[in-house]
Amino acid sequence: MSNYRIIKIQEHPELKNYAANWFHEKWNIPLEAYLESIDECMKNKTPVPQWYIVIIGDKIVGGLGVIENDFHNRKDLTPNVCAVYVEDDYRCQGIAGKMLNYVCDDMREKNIDTLYLVTDHTSFYECHGWEFLCMVQAEGEKNLTRMYIHRTT
């Protein structure tokens, strides 16, 4: 596997715009939403939100965030891992699993021992210690989507 680094955006403010643009391109969420969340992350007042990217050389090849709610109706299930993405050319190399483990460890250090995640994927997350919890209604979606839970204790 290529040499990569998992980076906390909070510790690298110089990467804020690069990361926000990358997430915006992958998920088509307004750039301003990412910039606002990353700015909040960099204030370091609360453990959430947090943003992470994976870099090889100077190229972002993966990333994810932790936010209060990932656009679903279960506001009580918080915080949520969101925007999990690995570039096509770097998939199936263990990067997503390493990102998830890194984030779970980082959140545990911040005294957050339970994380949630919404996804339509059905087997990937189970392989990384996540358990199916329930179905939730995503904003603007007709069909329900899967909610997973990860306990780090």
Image (tube, grey):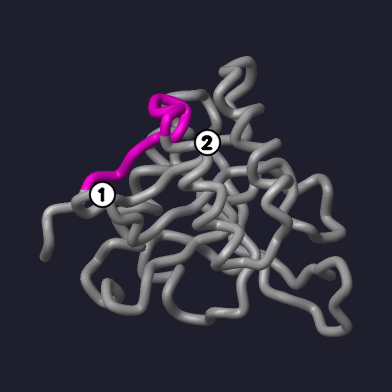
Q: Is residue 137 above or below residue 40?
A: below
Determine which residue is flagged by label 1. 58
Alpha carbon separation for disc pair 2 and 1: 32 Å
| Residue 138 lies in quadrant | bottom right
Type of amino acid at the residue the image marks with label 2: Asp
Q: Position of residue 44 (x, y in %)?
A: 57, 18
Tell me the tag on residue 113. 2
| Residue 66 lies in quadrant | top right
Q: Residue at x 19, y 51 (%)?
A: 57
Q: Which residues are magenta?
A: 5-14
Residue 92 or 126: which is nearer the viewer?
Answer: 92
Mark 2 burial class by Cα count in 10 Å: few <14, some 14-19, many 20+: some
Q: Is residue 87 above or below residue 150?
A: below
Q: What is the secondary structure assignment of the residue under circle 1?
A: loop
Q: Is residue 138 above or below residue 8?
A: below
Mark 1 burial class by Cα count in 10 Å: few <14, some 14-19, many 20+: few
Q: Residue at x 42, y 37 (%)?
A: 15
* Residue 13 is one of the magenta-drawn residues: yes
